[in-house]
Image: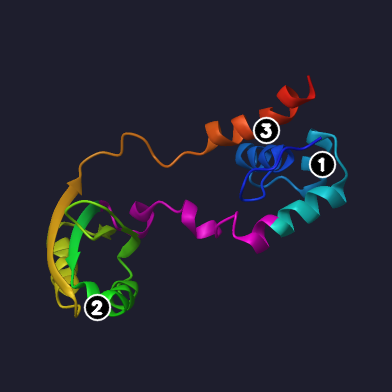
Amino acid sequence: MTIANSRGLDSLDGRIILALDKDPEASGLAIARMLGVARNTVHARLARLERSGALLPFSRRLDPAALGYGLMAFLSLSISQNRTGSVENGLAAIPEVIEVHATTGDADLMAKVVARGTSDLYRITNQILEIDGIQRTSTAISILELMPPRYHGLLARLSEQESRHAD
Protein backbone atom coordinates (compact mmCIF):
# COMPACT_ATOMS: atom_id res chain seq x y z
CA MET A 1 0.00 0.00 0.00
CA THR A 2 1.31 3.47 -0.88
CA ILE A 3 -0.04 6.72 0.48
CA ALA A 4 0.04 9.62 -2.01
CA ASN A 5 0.09 13.26 -0.98
CA SER A 6 -1.76 16.05 -2.77
CA ARG A 7 1.02 16.46 -5.37
CA GLY A 8 1.02 12.76 -6.21
CA LEU A 9 4.17 11.67 -4.37
CA ASP A 10 3.91 8.53 -2.32
CA SER A 11 6.17 6.66 0.07
CA LEU A 12 7.95 4.74 -2.71
CA ASP A 13 8.70 8.01 -4.49
CA GLY A 14 10.13 9.30 -1.22
CA ARG A 15 12.30 6.21 -0.80
CA ILE A 16 13.58 6.48 -4.38
CA ILE A 17 14.52 10.15 -3.93
CA LEU A 18 16.21 9.40 -0.60
CA ALA A 19 18.22 6.65 -2.31
CA LEU A 20 19.31 9.11 -4.99
CA ASP A 21 20.18 11.63 -2.28
CA LYS A 22 22.41 9.04 -0.66
CA ASP A 23 24.04 8.02 -3.97
CA PRO A 24 23.30 10.40 -6.87
CA GLU A 25 25.19 8.14 -9.28
CA ALA A 26 23.20 5.00 -8.39
CA SER A 27 21.70 3.22 -11.37
CA GLY A 28 18.02 2.36 -11.58
CA LEU A 29 18.98 -1.27 -11.02
CA ALA A 30 20.99 -0.43 -7.89
CA ILE A 31 18.10 1.59 -6.46
CA ALA A 32 15.65 -1.20 -7.30
CA ARG A 33 17.82 -3.73 -5.46
CA MET A 34 18.27 -1.39 -2.49
CA LEU A 35 14.50 -0.85 -2.18
CA GLY A 36 13.38 -4.35 -3.16
CA VAL A 37 11.30 -3.25 -6.15
CA ALA A 38 11.50 -3.92 -9.89
CA ARG A 39 13.97 -1.91 -11.98
CA ASN A 40 11.15 -0.94 -14.37
CA THR A 41 9.18 0.42 -11.41
CA VAL A 42 12.09 2.68 -10.41
CA HIS A 43 12.60 3.79 -14.02
CA ALA A 44 8.89 4.58 -14.49
CA ARG A 45 8.70 6.44 -11.17
CA LEU A 46 11.74 8.58 -11.98
CA ALA A 47 10.35 9.40 -15.44
CA ARG A 48 7.00 10.40 -13.90
CA LEU A 49 8.71 12.54 -11.24
CA GLU A 50 10.70 14.37 -13.92
CA ARG A 51 7.66 14.89 -16.19
CA SER A 52 5.55 16.21 -13.31
CA GLY A 53 8.22 18.70 -12.23
CA ALA A 54 8.65 17.06 -8.82
CA LEU A 55 12.34 16.51 -9.64
CA LEU A 56 14.00 19.82 -10.46
CA PRO A 57 16.91 20.28 -12.88
CA PHE A 58 20.31 19.04 -11.72
CA SER A 59 21.75 22.57 -11.92
CA ARG A 60 19.65 23.54 -8.87
CA ARG A 61 22.26 21.66 -6.78
CA LEU A 62 25.12 23.89 -7.92
CA ASP A 63 26.92 26.11 -5.40
CA PRO A 64 27.08 29.62 -6.96
CA ALA A 65 30.49 30.14 -5.33
CA ALA A 66 31.85 27.45 -7.67
CA LEU A 67 30.97 29.82 -10.53
CA GLY A 68 32.68 32.75 -8.82
CA TYR A 69 29.56 34.18 -7.18
CA GLY A 70 30.54 34.07 -3.52
CA LEU A 71 28.16 36.78 -2.30
CA MET A 72 24.46 36.12 -1.83
CA ALA A 73 21.85 38.77 -1.11
CA PHE A 74 18.12 39.02 -0.70
CA LEU A 75 16.39 41.99 -2.27
CA SER A 76 12.95 43.10 -1.17
CA LEU A 77 11.32 44.67 -4.20
CA SER A 78 8.41 47.09 -4.29
CA ILE A 79 6.72 47.12 -7.68
CA SER A 80 3.95 48.90 -9.54
CA GLN A 81 1.10 46.41 -9.40
CA ASN A 82 0.16 46.93 -13.04
CA ARG A 83 3.73 46.18 -14.21
CA THR A 84 4.10 42.62 -12.86
CA GLY A 85 4.76 41.07 -16.28
CA SER A 86 7.52 43.47 -17.24
CA VAL A 87 9.10 43.09 -13.80
CA GLU A 88 9.11 39.28 -14.08
CA ASN A 89 10.61 39.44 -17.58
CA GLY A 90 13.20 41.99 -16.51
CA LEU A 91 14.29 39.95 -13.50
CA ALA A 92 14.44 36.76 -15.60
CA ALA A 93 16.84 38.53 -17.99
CA ILE A 94 19.42 39.05 -15.21
CA PRO A 95 21.39 35.80 -14.71
CA GLU A 96 22.45 36.73 -11.19
CA VAL A 97 18.81 36.77 -10.06
CA ILE A 98 18.49 33.09 -9.18
CA GLU A 99 15.15 33.04 -7.39
CA VAL A 100 12.10 35.30 -7.06
CA HIS A 101 9.07 34.91 -4.78
CA ALA A 102 5.88 36.95 -4.52
CA THR A 103 5.49 37.81 -0.84
CA THR A 104 3.17 39.38 1.68
CA GLY A 105 4.17 42.27 3.87
CA ASP A 106 6.06 45.42 2.94
CA ALA A 107 7.72 43.97 -0.17
CA ASP A 108 5.89 42.67 -3.21
CA LEU A 109 8.71 40.38 -4.32
CA MET A 110 11.75 38.81 -2.71
CA ALA A 111 14.68 38.13 -5.04
CA LYS A 112 17.66 35.94 -4.23
CA VAL A 113 20.70 37.33 -6.01
CA VAL A 114 24.29 36.16 -6.33
CA ALA A 115 27.23 38.45 -7.03
CA ARG A 116 31.01 38.32 -7.29
CA GLY A 117 31.37 40.96 -4.57
CA THR A 118 29.80 44.12 -3.22
CA SER A 119 30.61 46.25 -6.29
CA ASP A 120 29.04 43.56 -8.49
CA LEU A 121 25.98 43.55 -6.21
CA TYR A 122 25.77 47.32 -6.66
CA ARG A 123 25.80 46.84 -10.45
CA ILE A 124 23.09 44.15 -10.26
CA THR A 125 20.93 46.23 -7.93
CA ASN A 126 21.12 49.20 -10.32
CA GLN A 127 20.23 46.89 -13.21
CA ILE A 128 17.18 45.74 -11.23
CA LEU A 129 16.19 49.33 -10.46
CA GLU A 130 16.20 50.07 -14.22
CA ILE A 131 13.42 47.52 -14.80
CA ASP A 132 10.14 49.21 -15.67
CA GLY A 133 7.83 48.74 -12.69
CA ILE A 134 10.44 48.45 -9.92
CA GLN A 135 9.83 51.28 -7.47
CA ARG A 136 12.47 50.55 -4.84
CA THR A 137 14.65 47.83 -3.38
CA SER A 138 16.02 46.95 0.03
CA THR A 139 19.04 44.68 0.24
CA ALA A 140 20.13 42.22 2.91
CA ILE A 141 23.48 40.51 2.34
CA SER A 142 23.81 36.94 3.54
CA ILE A 143 26.91 36.66 5.70
CA LEU A 144 26.61 32.92 6.41
CA GLU A 145 24.26 30.17 5.28
CA LEU A 146 23.25 28.56 8.56
CA MET A 147 20.97 25.97 6.99
CA PRO A 148 20.91 25.17 3.27
CA PRO A 149 17.69 24.08 1.58
CA ARG A 150 16.85 20.65 2.92
CA TYR A 151 14.19 18.08 2.16
CA HIS A 152 15.56 14.92 3.75
CA GLY A 153 13.26 15.11 6.78
CA LEU A 154 10.17 15.63 4.63
CA LEU A 155 11.13 12.73 2.36
CA ALA A 156 11.82 10.50 5.36
CA ARG A 157 8.39 11.35 6.76
CA LEU A 158 6.75 10.57 3.42
CA SER A 159 8.59 7.26 3.04
CA GLU A 160 7.65 6.26 6.60
CA GLN A 161 3.93 6.82 5.99
CA GLU A 162 3.60 3.45 4.29
CA SER A 163 4.93 1.51 7.27
CA ARG A 164 2.74 3.43 9.74
CA HIS A 165 -0.41 2.86 7.68
CA ALA A 166 0.38 -0.85 7.23
CA ASP A 167 0.08 -1.48 11.00
Name the mark nearer the viewer: 3 or 2.
2
Q: Amino acid at mark 2?
A: Arg
> Where, by quadrant of the figure, is residue 69 drawn?
bottom left
Residues under labels 3 and 2: Cα distance?
A: 43 Å
> Where, by quadrant of the figure, is residue 124 drawn?
bottom left
Residues under labels 2 and 1: Cα distance?
A: 49 Å
Q: Which segment is the magenta one? A: 49-71
> Where, by quadrant of the figure, is residue 110 drawn?
bottom left
Mark toward the start of the polypeptide (3 vs 1): 1
Say whether marks 3 and 1 touch (CB < 8 Å).
no
Residue situated in front as seen by the camera: 81 or 52: 81
Secondary structure at numbered mark 1: helix
Q: Number of numbered discs present?
A: 3
In the displayed structure, 82 sits above or below 122; it is: below
Secondary structure at numbered mark 2: helix
How far across and how far down the image is residue 164, in percent? 71, 23
Q: Residues within 10 Å of mark 1 (few under 14, many from 20)?
A: some
Q: Residues within 10 Å of mark 2 (few under 14, many from 20)?
A: few
How far across and how far down the image is residue 120, in percent? 17, 64
Say whether marks 2 and 1 touch (CB < 8 Å).
no
Residue denoted by label 2: 83
Mark toward the start of the polypeptide (2 vs 1): 1
- Identified at 67% across, 33% down, the residue is 159
Question: Magenta stretch: residue 91 in it?
Answer: no
- Identified at 66% across, 46% down, the residue is 9
Mark toward the start of the polypeptide (3 vs 2): 2
Q: Amino acid at mark 3?
A: Ser
In the displayed structure, 99 sits above or below 129; it is: above
Q: Amino acid at mark 1?
A: Ala
Question: Disc number at residue 32?
Answer: 1
